[in-house]
Image (cartoon, grey):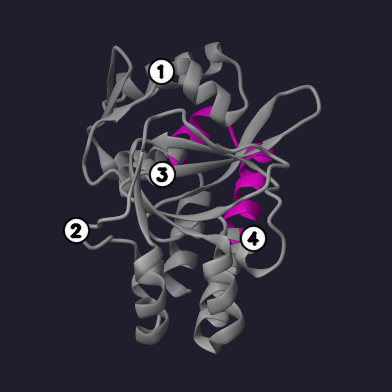
Amino acid sequence: MANKQLSIAPRNLLLDAFEKESRKRVDPYLERVEFKLGDVICEAGGVLHHAYFPDGAVISLLTVLMDGTAIETANIGREGAFGLFAAMYSRTSFNRSLVQLQGAMVRVRIDILHVEFERSAQIRNLFVSYSETLLAQIQQTVACNALHTTQQRICRWLLMMHDRADGRYLGYTHEFLADVLGVNRKSVTLAAQALQREGLINYHRGTIQVLDRFGLEKASCECYAVVKNHSKSS
């Protein structure tokens, strides 16, 4: 459900980086929308009418194959947005975009953002810079999916989600994790059990609590640190 009356200023870092005049022109068109876990924002091949700036929610970008299987190649939180490429060039989505942490987002029509992209050099630089950061995450995730163990990948994914959840518990079933990571459910169950035995997480009835953040980082592959450091330097 959309609400055009934004009683609280959105806490999205990308939106906050808009130059003052562009932000003044865009603000009247911002809408706050709430999403639940598993909501699909857009299917692969679908036409985007809005760009989405997470303000508590997290978006998962899934690459979908012809047989219907899918795997996550990136996720987006308050640091970014989904739909910027549509505002720059093409409105067709390359990915299925799925909500993997429920919460709020702020959306704005693609045509409004396209005008700012054409009008402002600062907005062009901002969009291109973030797109490069997102591409770096996609490339690292592809390598991680191909070369690292299920347990390492789960650690990476949990760390990325823990960063964005502001200390909240993470509510995920083994089935959901298996779907996002493109692995079978048994592999997820075994990995989660191992992490729980080591005291890194507590998993009970679909709720995950990170108990040892430092230990989880040590158990992860290098991909988490690579993506995080690249985001900081962008």
Considering only order in the chain, which callout, 4 or 1, is on the residue closer to the N terminus?
Answer: 4
* Mark 3 or 2, closer to the camera: 2
Callout 2 amino acid: Ile
Mark 2 lies on residue? 8
In magenta stretch: residue 140: yes
Look at the image and tell me whether residue 141 can be seen: yes
Residue depicted at x 62% and y 52%:
138
* Residue 13 percent across, percent down from the top left: 35, 66
User: Which residues fall within the magenta stretch?
Assistant: 135-156
Q: Mark 1 highlights which residue?
A: 173
Contact (Cβ within 8 Å) of mark 3 with mark 1: no
Instruction: Looking at the image, tell me whether mark 3 or mark 2 is earlier in sequence order.
Output: 2
Q: Nearer the viewer, mark 1 or mark 4?
A: 4
Q: Secondary structure at mark 2?
A: loop
| Most foreground residue, 202 or 73 | 73
- Label 3 sits on a secondary structure element that is strand
Q: Residues within 10 Å of mark 4 (few under 14, many from 20)?
A: many
- Which residue is the site of mark 4? 86
Residue position marked by numbered label 3 in the rendering: 58
Q: Are marks 2 and 1 in contact (CB under 8 Å)?
A: no
**Which residue is nearer to you in this view: 14 or 52?**
52
